[in-house]
Image (cartoon, helix red, strand yellow):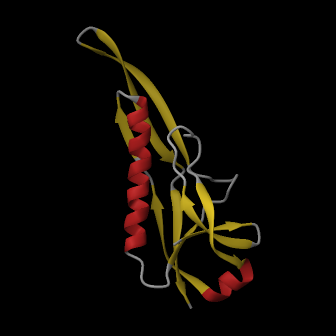
Amino acid sequence: MILRRYGSRVLSVTPNFDSRAMTEIGFVRDGEIALELDEFTARFERVAGRELGAEAKGDVQADVEEAVLASLRAQIEELLAGLEPGEALLIENEMGVDQPKTRGRQATIVVEGENRLVFEYAVDPPLRLGIMRPK
């Protein structure tokens, strides 16, 4: 389960990665869990943290964007699979402050006398996740 703080509440979320909206790494509230912040801090403690990033490079922009999101999703799923029963991931990035975003750039290279575009995308800043365990 993935949790995110929204003001004075902690809610469960699911990834909402869409390569057509490549500005922010998005999550959508799923309504499975809703706790007041005080209740959450009383019930859970942080035992570890991870920073996730992803990079991709290629000559088709849409494929590069999809590859970045697929890599990030795979890392999240791997972390979720490794959690003990009752543990959860807490998104520690603050919305509007250090929200993970995809950053892209393109360069023109010459291949066999022809100009070609190369696209590079990366997640910056990294997605910070805390591993939370019930007390």
Q: Which residue lies furthest to the bottom in this view?
A: 135
Q: Which residue lies furthest to the right in this view?
A: 8
How many marks do you count on the picture?
A: 0
**In the displayed structure, would residue 112 be above or below residue 58?**
above
Q: Residue furthest front?
A: 31
Q: Which of 47 and 6 is in front in this view?
A: 6
Q: Which of 34 and 114 is in front in this view?
A: 34
Residue 77, by quadrant, is bottom left
At which x and y percent is residue 118?
Answer: 37, 26
At which x and y percent is residue 81?
Answer: 38, 72
Q: Is residue 135 left or right of residue 122?
A: right
Q: Which residue lies furthest to the left in this view?
A: 112
Q: Is residue 74 left or right of residue 105?
A: left
Residue drawn at point x = 48 percent, y = 30 percent? 105
At which x and y percent is residue 108?
Answer: 39, 18
**In the displayed structure, would residue 3 be above or below residue 73?**
below
At which x and y percent is residue 69?
Answer: 44, 48
**In the displayed structure, would residue 66 be above or below residue 87?**
above
Residue drawn at point x = 50 percent, y = 40 percent? 19
The C terminus - image quarter: bottom right
